[in-house]
Image (cartoon, helix red, strand yellow):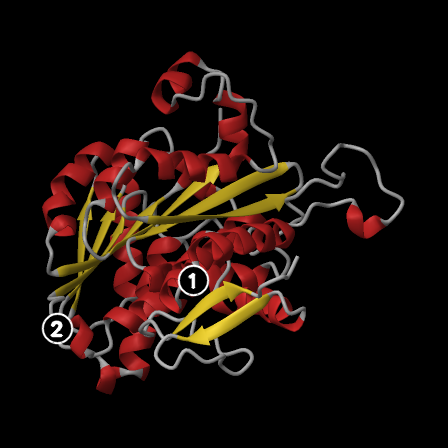
């Protein structure tokens, strides 16, 4: 008999996954709970944990509901003077009613006692829970963070993600164990649900494919997705983040790059240990085709084709998985090697080196272009 997940200590992978979540919710709460003229049309802030569990593991380590409650309490305690006057609604769901009863008791001990924090509990299957809460998520006056745990992967289909992506100001985090995907990618029921026929997926990089697959299934919905992989022993787990806002994507990518300074994508070497033709090279540094090499190649092609302004460049880099700090390193190098020229849109003059204006608040100021004659 398989032991219940919450009756065991969390694995190192689960702890790292929850640490990423903790870091992101801290950023997210700070944005949406701080009084700001830009958020005057946001009337409620909502966090949904659709696979909540009892709130902690067998050793008392905090699960996602406890992290949510503690981060909110910390914000209210430390930044009460900056807090916007709007309700914070927490929606915890688990199909196991016993776990919800445990969660209620636990959160009463640790949660913020202010009237602004309101907890709601339910014990529905995921599809029913999503239907019941969807009108709240879809409301244009709400800001939402939606947590979908790995145990719901059979329910978290592209259609469910697309439904959430259609909601304004809604970020999502969902967790995928690669072992599950690797094992069941050829199972008839799984193939029908995820349409993976004919795909030969590498175990290490399977989340890249799944993330791209979800992007494709979003169709014309403007929504940004990014993956992060976590390896412990032979097992690999994945996180996929989604946001309709570039600033949300930037914040998640910054967290990922803090954890992985090479690719911002994993806690291990996600790329092959072999060169691209599969043969070992005598120069060790050439045995891995680095993500940054592909990024520089794509960046050059984009500049040559589009001569983008800084706003377009900001979006391009984020969609490639590179936040401004990492993008700037590549752009600095292209400038130093005299491949890249950066020109003021208004004055038509070359701007000072390193002035790229890559952030969510900037208006179009400069244009990126290849230096004539550069190879």
Q: Residues within 10 Å of mark 1 (few under 14, many from 20)?
A: many
In percent of width and height, residue 52 lies at: 32, 47
Quadrant of res 333: bottom right
| Extreme residue in the bottom direction | 81
- Toward which corner of the image does residue 314 lie, by quadrant? bottom left
Kind of element beneath mark 1: helix
Location of mark 2 (residue) = 40
The image shows residue 44 at horizontal and vertical percentages of 13, 64
Q: Residue furthest front?
A: 373
- Tag 1 near tag 2, CB within 8 Å: no
* Residue 83 sits above or below residue 261 on the image: below
- Residue drawn at 47 percent across, 58 percent down: 317
Examine the rendered structure and indicate whether residue 142 appears above or below residue 273: below
Residue at mark 1: 313
State left or right for residue 167 relative to residue 324.
left
Mark 2 crowdedness (10 Å alpha carbons): few <14, some 14-19, many ≥20: few
Q: Which mark is in front, 1 or 2?
A: 1
In the displayed structure image, the side of residue 310 where residue 145 appears, left or right: left
Relative side of 238 to 113, left or right: right
Horizontal side, residue 155 vs residue 177: left or right: left
CA–CA distance in space, label 1 to label 2 = 28 Å
Q: Nearer the viewer, residue 103 or 163?
A: 163
The C terminus lies in quadrant: bottom right
Residue 322 vertical position relative to residue 31 in the rendered view, above or below: above
């Amino acid at each position: 008999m398989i032991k219940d997940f919450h009756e065991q200590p969390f694995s190192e992978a689960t702890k790292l996954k929850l640490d990423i979540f903790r870091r992101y919710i801290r950023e997210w709460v700070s944005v949406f709970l701080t009084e700001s003229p830009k958020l005057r049309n946001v009337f409620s802030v909502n966090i949904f944990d659709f696979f909540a569990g009892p709130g902690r593991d067998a050793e008392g380590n905090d699960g996602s509901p406890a992290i949510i409650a503690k981060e909110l309490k910390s914000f209210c305690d430390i930044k009460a003077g900056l807090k916007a006057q709007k309700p914070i609604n927490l929606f915890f769901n688990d199909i196991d009613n016993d776990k919800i009863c445990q969660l209620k008791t636990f959160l009463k001990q640790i949660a913020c006692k202010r009237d602004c924090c309101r907890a709601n509990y339910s014990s529905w299957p995921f599809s029913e829970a999503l239907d019941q809460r969807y009108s709240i998520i879809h409301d244009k006056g709400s800001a939402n963070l939606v947590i979908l745990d790995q145990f719901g992967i059979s329910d978290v289909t592209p259609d469910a993600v697309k439904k959430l992506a259609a909601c304004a100001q809604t970020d999502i985090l969902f967790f995928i164990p690669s072992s599950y995907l690797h094992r069941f990618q050829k199972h008839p029921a799984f193939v029908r649900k995820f349409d993976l026929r004919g795909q030969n997926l590498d175990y290490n990089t399977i989340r890249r494919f799944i993330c791209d697959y979800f992007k494709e299934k979003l169709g014309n919905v403007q929504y940004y997705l990014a993956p992060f992989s976590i390896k412990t022993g032979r097992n690999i787990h994945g996180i996929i983040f989604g946001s309709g806002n570039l600033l949300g994507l930037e914040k998640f990518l910054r967290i990922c790059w803090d954890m992985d300074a090479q690719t911002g994508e994993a806690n291990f070497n996600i790329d092959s240990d072999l060169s691209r033709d599969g043969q070992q090279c005598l120069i060790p540094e050439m045995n891995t085709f680095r993500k940054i090499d592909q990024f520089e190649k794509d960046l050059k092609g984009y500049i040559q084709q589009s001569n983008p302004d800084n706003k377009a460049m900001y979006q391009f880099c984020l969609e490639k998985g590179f936040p401004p700090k990492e993008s700037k390193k590549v752009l600095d190098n292209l400038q130093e090697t005299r491949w890249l020229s950066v020109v003021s849109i208004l004055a038509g003059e070359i701007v000072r080196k390193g002035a790229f204006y890559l952030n969510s608040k900037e208006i179009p100021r400069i244009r990126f272009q290849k230096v004539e004659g550069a190879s």
